Image (cartoon, rainbow, N blue to C red):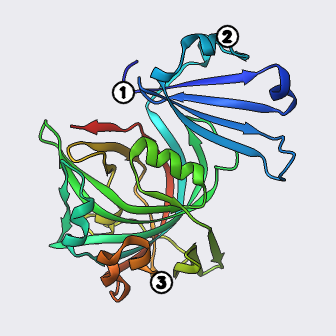
Amino acid sequence: MNDEFFSVLVFKCFSGYQERSHSWQLLITMNDDFILVFKYSKHNPNKKSPRIASLLIPLKHINPKTLKNSSFITHRSSLIYMAVFLSAEWRKLAILNYAADPASLKPFLPAHTELDYWNGVCYASMVGFWFADTRVLGMKIPFHVNFEEVNLRFYVKHQTPQGEWRRGVVFVRELVPKPAIAWVANTLYRERYSALPMRHSWEADADKLSVEYSWKYKGHWNHLGVRADAQPIPLKAGSEAEFITEHYWGYARWNDKETMQYQVEHPRWELYPVEQWRADINFSALYGPAFAYLEKAEPLSVFLAEGSAVSVRKGARIV
């Protein structure tokens, strides 16, 4: 299999218990080493909610006859090659930008990358936004389509062997309310996702827009919110906002010598001029004592971006 692409195999079940329970399974081969399996069943006698399970299976542990002789019916047309792993909409991104201590970020710095500065400042951003219409390899996973995300990220750059500089982001930690999303991202991309209770609120009138994201950690609700003009404005070339929002690569530490790199595609975002902001974030509890200094720091800037449709392409390791 070409390592530059994903393959998707969709299996429909036509017999036995699984037919009666309206089950289906989605098997995704991420590379030559693993198969990722999602299973969904509407029938769950013990709970009101449907059952969803996910499992990452090493291919070396699978006997080819197991699939051939199973109750699944497959067709050659089910095999689709595509480079986009995830597509979604990222909407109403509330972004608090802090002057970061480079020493607090270096333990998270992946191999083959270096910190990226703007006007001599090393930035870390707290970002809350709404994930909408989420699709994995073009398909919606039930009950994992719309959800909140909050992350703490910083900015890096990587030089390719051809001499091209790629500007990207590294995540200290990402929060979502869906355990399966966290598991997939951590397993396949070596990201640092955690699943927590989360909620959000959007309030809009003719002139103003208020957006807030909240998450519960160790019994305490953290908050990140902004109030802005309701009319968005375009990004200015060379601005701080352009630096923060125009990073199109993600980097994650694979091990001491290897880094996962993936491309993120989206158009330029419009911004809502922010008038007020509020944040109640326990940085030391969420991210460790090295980030306690952010609890007393004032953001250098606060943005509210409208966002857009985005595509996250298949990752590849830098060695």
Q: Which of 141 and 193 is in front in this view?
A: 193
Read off the residue under disc 2: 69
Residue 51 rendering spot, x and y as whole percentages = 74, 44
- The percent coordinates of residue 263 (x first, y second) are 36, 43
- Give residue 12's quadrant in the image: top right
The answer to whether residue 141 shows anywhere in this view is no
Q: In which quarter of the image is the N terminus?
A: top left
Instruction: Determine which quarter of the picture holds residue 269.
Output: bottom left
Where disc 3 sits, the SS reads strand
* Left or right: residue 146 compared with residue 159: right
Q: Choose mark 3 or mark 2, whichever is in front.
A: 2
Location of mark 1 (residue): 4
User: Going by the image, does 191 lie left or right of 129?
Assistant: left
Q: How far apart are marks 3 and 2 (CA)?
A: 56 Å
Q: Nearer the viewer, residue 235 or 278?
A: 278
The image shows residue 17 at horizontal and vertical percentages of 84, 27
- Secondary structure beneath disc 2? loop
* Circle 3 residue: 279
Of all residues, the one furthest to the bottom in this rendering is 296
Residue at point 84%, 22% (across, down): 16
User: Looking at numbered disc 3 in the image, what kind of residue is underneath it?
Assistant: Ala
Q: Mark 3: few, some, or many residues within 10 Å (few <14, many ≥20)?
A: some
Percent across and percent down for residue 48 are 84, 53
Sequence-wise, the earlier of marks 3 and 2 is 2
Q: Residue 197 carries which label?
A: none
Q: Nearer the viewer, mark 1 or mark 2?
A: 2
Q: Is residue 34 above or below residue 1?
A: below
